[in-house]
């Protein structure tokens, strides 16, 4: 590793100890390498002069040549504002200052030719440039030309005069300290395979682009490198784990699975279900521990896949468990399993936080003696007191609710880690899956059971309730049931509970002929179960609820989902909620209620919902609208999304290529022992030591 790169930034001309400290604290920049990797966020073309009459709203920064006709000052004291009227003969702009006014007044003179550089904004129908950069116009040759880098800075940095321009100067002097070409940060086989320019040239051109083509190559190279090391780390970890962890071998095709398949399977499996069960069987028989992510849109029939996979484990003499994120969902799974397996010799038990002490004790004992074959439950399953005789297979439903640590705890319940199937209905775009769950094998159910009609999604303003009520009435008379969902977020809990209560009262009054119930997270589990039971039995026609029904709940006769204040939900959540209907043979509806005034982003979200039912499209759109950091699941994944230059949505092509090359490298040299791969190992250690712990993902 080059020593110059590891030099402390305080030795860079123009930095010194004081500024170094600010850069350390504010942006984590300690060494020259950190500084050189503080990439610009954009470039401005300073080779071009614009005319004032050309200005339009889409220009981030522009450069003008002209003269100040007059100064004008407004306000008093701290509210003082100085305006210079500036013209180039094609129009006028106002240059505006709020600080340093006296200095400006003295420095710049009317009727002198200047180059003005800044961001134009429209204010009171006039173009304004606040705090522009102004240079005297000397001649064409002295003007800065070409692309100039712009750097992100914090408020604190700015208050110490470390603005974008200062950063540019500092980076320039740091680069000036480099006497020899920088050694490459990737091995030459990778550089060749990906057709990259050398590291030295990339760093030079990212900060001081010689031309747009070289800038593009520099960006590509640095993005590739960033994504490559993440992938290399994931691929290496996965390969390592696969080589070390032996899994239980489930070889036997047994009686339980056969009996179930022949006698009790309630319907023909979809092709996608068959394919996934085959993939799981192959894993379980392979001798390696299975770690599989099963993605399937809401209603695609993941539960049945889980059940049949569990029967394979049971046929081979092992116990299994299924962990769900809520009590409602756990009880519902328990009911489904008990019903489907009623006439078979398989013991199913339910363990949740509200299981009574006595029952709990007997369950715990039967687990240890091996009497229980399938244990269904919530977080309660993770507790240390829950000990199995021989746990061979773990299913985790609706995975995004579980953290990494919780999953790891389940593994430890046997001396060999059990096979793991993680099921999620939050479709994860492939790019994100590769980054977040990169070491899990992925199965996809991409087909809904036959006979489902796509849910019709409609947007209505909250001022038009009459028509909505008439529609709900028609549906209920036709035998259907209705969900009405209100948002509830913790910060706003009391207010939200009140609007739920008001909404509930209002609906009760509007529909005196039907039974209306409400449900929310503050109710006792037993109360919630009772409400769900009555709704399932169609004793209740309208269920007014918070998002506690969001995941997993299955009431096929419910055909209308009304979402109040839909503007307050994210796309993933809206899609989950919509997935509660459309589960039976009837045409179902999702009605999104919002106020009339909506932000552009919200309108876009609502539009996407009304246009598509495809969970993967929605997840992609969500990722684009919100960015990966906010996406459900990423926080819990434990991965910081502090990518410096790449973007896993926009740069997906680079990501896929980086993955391929990382796989080739690890296939040939699993421990990166070849001498040319030394640099890869060093970089990997540096990255995982500093910021990421990419290895410990699942
Ligand atoms: P999810 O994938 O959202 O967990 P579920 O497993 O709850 O979906 O299945 C949704 C509904 O579809 C359930 O009522 C289930 O019984 C039904 N179902 C599952 N597989 C099939 C199939 N192959 N044919 C018909 N209905 C099915
Ligand atoms: Mg489910």
Image (cartoon, rainbow, N blue to C red):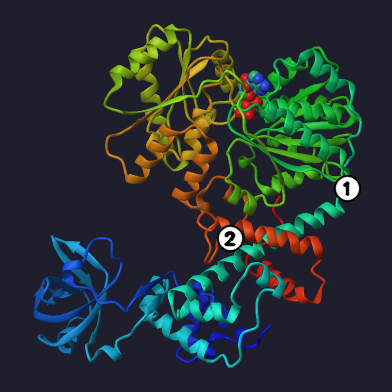
The alpha-carbon separation of the residues under discs 2 and 1 comes to 33 Å
Q: Position of residue 218 (x, y in %)?
A: 53, 73
Observer able to see residue 694: no
Name the residue nearer the viewer: 596 or 608: 608
* Apparent side of residue 55 relative to residue 324 in the rendered image (left or right): left
Name the residue nearer the viewer: 94 or 9: 94
Identity of the residue drawn at 65% across and 87% down: 3
Q: Image quarter for residue 148?
A: bottom left
Q: Position of residue 227 (x, y in %)?
A: 61, 63
Q: Image quarter for residue 257?
A: top right
Q: Quadrant of the N terminus?
A: bottom right
* Circle 2 residue: 654
Q: What element carries label 1?
A: loop
Task: Tell me if label 2 and label 1 are in contact, CB under 8 Å.
Answer: no
Name the residue nearer the viewer: 528 or 59: 59
Observer able to see residue 489: yes
Q: Count of labels shown?
A: 2
Identity of the residue drawn at 70% across and 74% down: 187
* Circle 1 residue: 246
Residue 616 higher or lower than 363, as above or below: below
Counting residues from the start of the chain, the first of labels 2 and 1 encountered is 1
Q: Nearer the viewer, mark 2 or mark 1?
A: 2
């Amino acid at each position: 590793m080059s020593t110059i790169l590891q030099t402390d930034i305080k030795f860079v001309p123009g930095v010194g100890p004081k500024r170094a400290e600010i850069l350390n604290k504010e942006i984590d920049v300690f060494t020259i390498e950190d500084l050189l990797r503080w990439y610009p966020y954009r470039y401005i073309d300073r080779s071009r002069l614009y005319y004032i009459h050309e200005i339009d709203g889409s220009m981030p920064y522009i450069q003008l040549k002209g003269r100040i006709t007059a100064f004008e000052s407004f306000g008093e004291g701290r509210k003082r504002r100085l305006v210079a009227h500036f013209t180039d003969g094609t129009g006028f702009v106002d240059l505006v200052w709020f600080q340093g006014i006296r200095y400006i007044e003295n420095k710049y003179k009317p009727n002198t030719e200047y180059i003005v550089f800044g961001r134009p904004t429209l204010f009171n129908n006039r173009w304004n440039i606040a705090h522009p950069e102004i240079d005297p116009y000397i001649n064409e040759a002295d003007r800065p030309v070409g692309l100039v880098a712009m750097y992100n800075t914090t408020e604190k940095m700015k208050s110490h005069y470390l603005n974008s321009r200062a950063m540019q100067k500092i980076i320039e002097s740091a680069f000036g300290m480099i006497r020899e070409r920088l050694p490459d940060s990737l091995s030459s086989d990778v550089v060749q395979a990906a057709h990259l320019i050398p590291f030295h040239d990339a760093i030079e051109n990212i900060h001081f682009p010689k031309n747009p083509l070289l800038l593009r190559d520099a960006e590509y190279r640095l993005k590739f490198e960033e994504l490559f090391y993440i992938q290399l780390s994931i691929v290496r970890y996965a390969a390592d784990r696969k080589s070390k962890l032996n899994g239980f071998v489930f070889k036997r095709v047994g009686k339980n699975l056969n009996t179930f398949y022949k006698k009790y399977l309630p319907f023909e499996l979809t092709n996608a279900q068959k394919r996934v069960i085959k993939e799981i069987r192959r894993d379980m028989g392979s001798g390696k521990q299975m770690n599989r992510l099963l993605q399937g849109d809401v209603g695609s029939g993941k539960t049945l896949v889980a059940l049949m996979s569990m029967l394979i484990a049971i046929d081979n003499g092992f116990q299994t468990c299924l962990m769900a994120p809520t009590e409602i969902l756990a009880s519902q799974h328990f009911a489904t399993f008990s019903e489907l397996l009623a006439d078979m010799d398989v013991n199913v038990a339910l363990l949740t936080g509200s299981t009574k002490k006595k029952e709990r004790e007997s369950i715990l004992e039967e687990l240890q003696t091996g009497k229980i074959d399938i244990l269904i439950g919530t977080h309660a399953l993770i507790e240390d007191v829950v000990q199995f005789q021989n746990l061979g297979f773990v299913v985790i439903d609706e995975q995004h609710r579980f953290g990494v640590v919780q999953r790891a705890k389940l593994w430890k319940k046997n001396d060999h880690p059990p096979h793991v199937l993680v099921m999620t209905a939050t479709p994860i775009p492939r790019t994100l899956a590769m980054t977040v769950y990169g070491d899990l094998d992925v199965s996809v159910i991409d087909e809904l059971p036959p006979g489902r009609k796509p849910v019709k999604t409609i947007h209505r303003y909250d001022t038009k309730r009459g028509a909505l009520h008439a529609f709900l009435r028609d549906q209920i008379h036709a035998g259907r049931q209705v969900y009405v969902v209100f948002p509830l977020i913790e910060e706003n809990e009391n207010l939200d509970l009140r609007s739920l209560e008001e909404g509930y009262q209002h609906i009760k009054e509007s529909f005196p002929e039907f039974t209306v119930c409400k449900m929310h997270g503050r109710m006792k589990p037993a109360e919630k179960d009772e409400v769900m039971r009555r709704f399932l039995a169609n004793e209740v026609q309208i269920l007014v609820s918070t998002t506690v029904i969001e995941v997993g709940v299955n009431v096929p006769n419910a055909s209308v989902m009304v979402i109040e204040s839909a503007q307050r939900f994210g796309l993933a959540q809206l899609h989950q909620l919509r997935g509660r209907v459309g589960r039976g043979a009837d045409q179902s509806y999702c009605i999104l209620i919002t106020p009339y005034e909506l932000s552009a982003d919200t309108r876009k979200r609502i539009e996407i919902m009304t246009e598509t039912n495809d969970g993967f499209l929605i997840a992609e759109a969500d990722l684009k609208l919100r960015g990966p950091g906010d996406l459900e699941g990423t926080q819990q994944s434990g991965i910081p999304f502090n990518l410096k230059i790449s973007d896993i949505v926009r740069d997906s092509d680079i990501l896929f290529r980086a993955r391929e090359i990382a796989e080739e490298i690890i296939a040939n040299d699993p421990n990166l022992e070849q001498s040319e791969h030394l640099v890869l190992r060093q970089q990997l250690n540096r990255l995982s030591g500093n910021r990421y712990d990419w290895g410990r993902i699942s």
